[in-house]
């Protein structure tokens, strides 16, 4: 497996390293003032990879470690010297990615900065910059980079003398004052009434006018801190040393926070959420806290007004909490209520009541593409004469053991009247585990991405285009039987897996792919563009919630792992697998605090996310083998503090299903990380699997992520994802919703069935692992590169949609399409849709590229071969087979 950090040429500064006893050592320091920065708290505007190039590596005294930033000019790194110091100079040891122009800035409070030195002719290596200023904080602010990478520093050294103005000698006649950093070793259960924050250094994410952070800790209720008018703002105070924190008091001005978090940190860099407030009403808030740290941060989540946040005073109490607000870790309750957004019906429920609730949800959700409504409809075994129209973030599911246990005799419908008959934005909805007997004889599921149909028995025809015959852009069927004909017509592409098309299929446009499907049409690619595999491979069907009639309670069924698969799992008897009762699950609700979810996972419970939006500051960490993490009704996780939303350890058998990850405005390293860098465990007998996992970067807010889904664990199964960097909605723009990759696979023997990956700014999919296998790939390149010059790398125009790393020796894929429509500059030409190493073990089947209306050009399909895709006629360019430089 390849390193996640690419190697670069060593710069002149690195050539000067001295190797002492096997350790890369700093060169001899110039004589003079003290080195103040080594080991001090350090932060940065961004980090290329937290595991390999953190900000702290620039002040650790080790020239074998480095900080590197994201690849843009306006990046910075700053160090907290602990108190105001007289700064003599800064010494910078650059890696090859150096700054040609940058500014050295100083600040007493970390909020208001002044320029102390400017460099405009940097040439890398080692820079010595005279400063001659004072401040507690020193920041290196980038202006221009020398390379296409970010800034990269082996070491940032600040030399000077602590103390700028000597403290006055205390007058012995003065009254004693409260120690701002009281002794944290008092008796248990004692919370000091004093204010540990009084007159301590305070910083903030922003300041409005003259109202600086220090005014919130000055003890004067006539002065205040005020932020800029956005939700994601914060203020923090440095208590001087790590202490037990038992509470904070907040005196709000009229512009208060309706939702916010209290976070603690030992180093000012890594934060833990110690308390969450979701119902703030202004005035004076007293918040119980149970934790420790040197730094206390109040992090805003939602404002009550159109102004920023405004605090008269922030008071911090230290000592042990006397009344912890949370029960002990490990004591979370299992099972329980599925929440208000899950609607459950049985045969005794009046039909008119069911229909009214279905209609009300559809009225709300039909066009609410970026709203927060989330709905799950569950039908217990029985027959239901209702019409289920399915809008955004709505899941309609049978709650029987098998599909035929529930029969909806009206129909389950997805159409596109809300969008003028165009179904290309019919996202985020699902139907599962039931029989549909449409009263018209023809059911309709006109959808595009993130809208799976699983375990469905359609007793009639099925149309996957809108009633107006407008465009639709891709979908997914698995473990289903369609008795009548499937009509594709204006559906551009589709993947059907392990199903039975008893009535056949009519209508093919760009890329129809089938694997393990009985009665599928045969391969005819390139004309018509059909690709069919007799069997799928190694697969596990998605877990699902059902009503266990024998136990009289809910349970989750986990289908067994299968190989060489074909057809449904349930036509010839119930799906084989394991039933897990709900009392082995923690049933999460949207207002849950992170510790409860992680405590449940730590004690070996599974987790069921009920419908809603989960704003979580901490990572959800799945550490135990064979854990099931299942969402209902498009349960959505938003990371609020720039962390990876969910991680899965390198253990056997974890299943993650039906979760939507929505990137927050603070950049995260990933949304879902499966395994970790260097994972090597063999999971062939019990692989990790992810099913119907969707990622959104932008659209609702200006989300940011480095790589959306990263798979490091070997043998992982990817069973239908849509990883989407938004091209419409709120928070959209080349420098706004930033994201490099939609999917990165570093693990070996990873199988992917149904990859939808779109609009990322570099390789949409980057495959570094050996023996990877993909069946069906749909991609659109980003709409918004500013120009081909801004989107060229290594002499190559544009970034391929699907890149297999140059050192991979075995890889195989079938049914891959990439499309372009460059809305910012339609003259952009991309050299290749796909790039793979030329070696006999890498084989690519049924590839195509499409220029949509001529807005952009693909020069070649793959590796410099295949016809050009261009022109207003929107005619795909196709290559039936490619391997080792040869096409077929």
Image (spheres, rainbow, N blue to C red):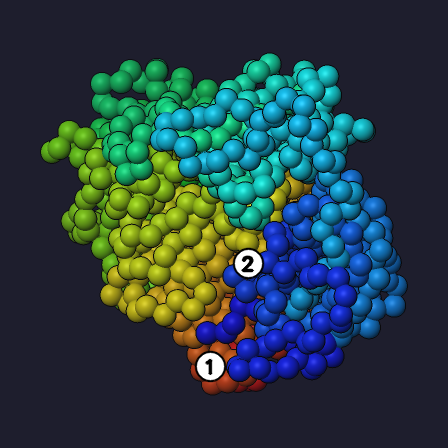
| Residue 533 visible (yes or no) | no
**Is residue 85 rendered to the left or right of residue 43?**
right
Taking the image as shown, residue 567 lies to the left or right of residue 53, namely: left
> What SS does tag 2 mark?
loop
* Residue 153 visible to an observer of this rendering: yes
Mark 2 or mark 1, whichever is nearer to me: 2
Percent across and percent down for residue 445 are 45, 40
Q: Nearer the viewer, residue 395 or 306?
A: 306
**Circles 2 and 1: CB atoms closer than 8 Å:** no
| Picture layout, residue 8 above or below residue 55 | below
| Residue at which label 1 appears | 809
Q: Quadrant of residue 341?
A: top left
- Residue indicated by mark 2: 50
Q: Earlier in the sequence, mark 2 or mark 1?
A: 2
Disc 2: CA contacts within 10 A as few (<14), some (14-19) or many (>=20): few
- The residue at the point 78 percent across, 43 percent down is 165
Q: Residue at x 19, y 51 (%)?
A: 577
Count of all numbered marks drawn on residues in the image: 2
- Decide which of 675, 124 is in the foreground and name it: 124
Give the crowd class for mark 1: few <14, some 14-19, many >=20 residues within 10 Å. some
- Identity of the residue drawn at 68% across and 17% down: 221
């Amino acid at each position: 497996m390849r390193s996640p950090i690419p190697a670069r040429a060593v710069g002149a500064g690195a050539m000067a390293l001295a190797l002492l006893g096997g350790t890369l050592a700093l060169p001899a320091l110039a004589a003079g003032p003290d080195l103040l920065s080594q080991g001090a708290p350090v932060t940065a505007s961004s980090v290329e990879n937290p595991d390999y190039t953190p900000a702290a590596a620039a002040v650790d005294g080790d020239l074998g470690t480095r900080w590197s930033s994201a690849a843009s000019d306006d990046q910075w790194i700053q160090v907290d010297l602990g108190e105001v110091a007289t700064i003599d100079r800064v010494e910078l040891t650059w890696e090859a990615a150096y700054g040609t122009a940058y500014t050295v800035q100083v600040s007493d409070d970390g909020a208001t900065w002044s320029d102390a030195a400017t460099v405009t002719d940097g040439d890398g290596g080692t820079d010595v910059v005279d400063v001659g200023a004072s401040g507690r904080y020193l920041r290196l602010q980038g202006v221009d980079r020398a390379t296409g990478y970010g800034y990269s520093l082996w070491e940032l050294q600040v030399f000077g003398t602590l103390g700028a103005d000597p403290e006055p000698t205390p007058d012995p006649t003065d009254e004693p004052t409260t120690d701002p950093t009281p002794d944290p070793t008092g008796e248990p259960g004692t919370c000091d009434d004093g204010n540990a924050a009084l007159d301590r250094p305070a910083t903030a994410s922003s300041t409005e006018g003259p109202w600086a952070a220090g005014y919130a800790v000055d003890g004067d209720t006539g002065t205040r801190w005020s932020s800029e008018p956005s939700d994601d703002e914060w203020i923090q105070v440095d208590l001087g040393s790590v202490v037990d924190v038992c509470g904070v008091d907040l005196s709000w001005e009229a512009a208060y926070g309706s939702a916010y978090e209290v976070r603690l940190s030992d180093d000012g860099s890594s934060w833990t959420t110690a308390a969450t407030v979701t119902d703030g009403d202004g005035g004076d808030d007293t918040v119980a806290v149970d934790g420790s740290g040197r730094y206390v941060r109040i992090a805003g989540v939602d404002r009550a007004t159109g102004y920023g946040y405004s605090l008269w005073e922030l008071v911090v109490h230290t000592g042990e909490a006397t009344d912890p607000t949370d029960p002990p870790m490990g004591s979370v309750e299992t099972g329980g209520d599925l929440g208000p957004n899950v609607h459950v019906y049985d045969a005794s429920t009046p039909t008119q009541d069911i229909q009214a609730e279905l209609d009300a949800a559809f009225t709300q959700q039909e066009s609410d593409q970026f709203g927060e409504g989330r709905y799950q409809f569950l039908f217990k075994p029985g027959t239901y004469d209702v019409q289920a129209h399915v809008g955004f973030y709505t899941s309609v599911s049978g709650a029987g053991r098998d599909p035929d246990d529930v029969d909806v005799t009206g129909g389950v419908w997805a159409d596109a009247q809300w969008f003028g008959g165009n179904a290309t934005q019919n996202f985020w909805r699902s139907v599962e585990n039931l029989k549909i007997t449409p009263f018209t004889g023809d059911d309709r599921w006109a959808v595009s991405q993130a809208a799976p149909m699983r375990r469905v028995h359609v007793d009639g025809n099925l149309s996957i285009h809108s009633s107006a015959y407008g465009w639709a852009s891709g979908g997914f069927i698995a473990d289903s039987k369609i008795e009548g004909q499937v009509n594709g017509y204006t559906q551009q592409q589709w993947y059907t897996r392990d199903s039975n098309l008893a009535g056949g299929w009519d209508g093919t446009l760009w890329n129809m792919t089938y694997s393990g499907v009985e009665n599928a049409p045969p391969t005819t690619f390139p004309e018509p563009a059909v690709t069919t595999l007799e069997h799928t491979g190694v697969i596990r069907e998605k877990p699902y919630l059902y009503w266990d009639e024998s136990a009289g309670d809910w349970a989750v069924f986990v289908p067994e792992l299968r190989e060489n698969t074909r057809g449904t799992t349930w036509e010839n008897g119930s799906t084989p697998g394991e039933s897990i009762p709900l009392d082995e699950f923690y049933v999460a609700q949207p207002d849950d605090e992170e510790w409860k979810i992680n405590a449940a996972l730590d004690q070996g419970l599974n987790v069921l996310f009920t419908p809603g939006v989960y704003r979580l500051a901490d990572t959800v960490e799945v550490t135990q083998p064979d854990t099931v993490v299942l969402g209902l009704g498009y349960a959505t996780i938003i990371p609020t503090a720039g962390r990876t939303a969910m991680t899965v350890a390198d253990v056997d058998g974890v299943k993650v299903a039906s979760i939507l990850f929505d990137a927050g405005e603070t950049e995260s390293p990933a949304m879902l990380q499966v395994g970790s860098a260097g994972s090597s465990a063999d999971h062939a007998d019990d692989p990790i699997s992810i099913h119907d996992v969707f990622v959104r970067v932008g659209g609702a807010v200006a989300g940011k992520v480095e790589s959306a889904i990263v798979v490091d664990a070997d043998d992982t199964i990817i069973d239908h994802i849509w990883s989407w960097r938004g091209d419409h909605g709120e928070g959209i723009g080349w420098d706004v919703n930033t994201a490099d990759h939609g999917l990165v696979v570093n693990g070996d023997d990873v199988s992917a069935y149904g990859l939808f990956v779109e609009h990322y700014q570099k390789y949409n999919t980057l495959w570094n692992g050996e023996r990877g296998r993909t069946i069906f790939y749909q991609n659109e390149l980003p709409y918004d590169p500013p120009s081909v010059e801004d989107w060229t790398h290594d002499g190559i125009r544009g970034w391929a949609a699907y890149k297999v790393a140059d050192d991979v020796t075995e890889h195989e894929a079938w049914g891959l399409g990439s499309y372009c429509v460059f809305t910012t500059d339609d003259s952009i030409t991309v050299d290749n849709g796909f790039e793979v190493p030329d070696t006999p073990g890498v084989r690519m089947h049924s590839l195509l590229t499409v220029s949509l209306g001529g807005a952009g050009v693909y020069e070649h399909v793959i590796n410099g071969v295949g016809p050009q895709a261009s022109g207003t006629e929107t005619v795909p360019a196709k290559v039936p087979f490619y391997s080792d430089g040869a096409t077929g």
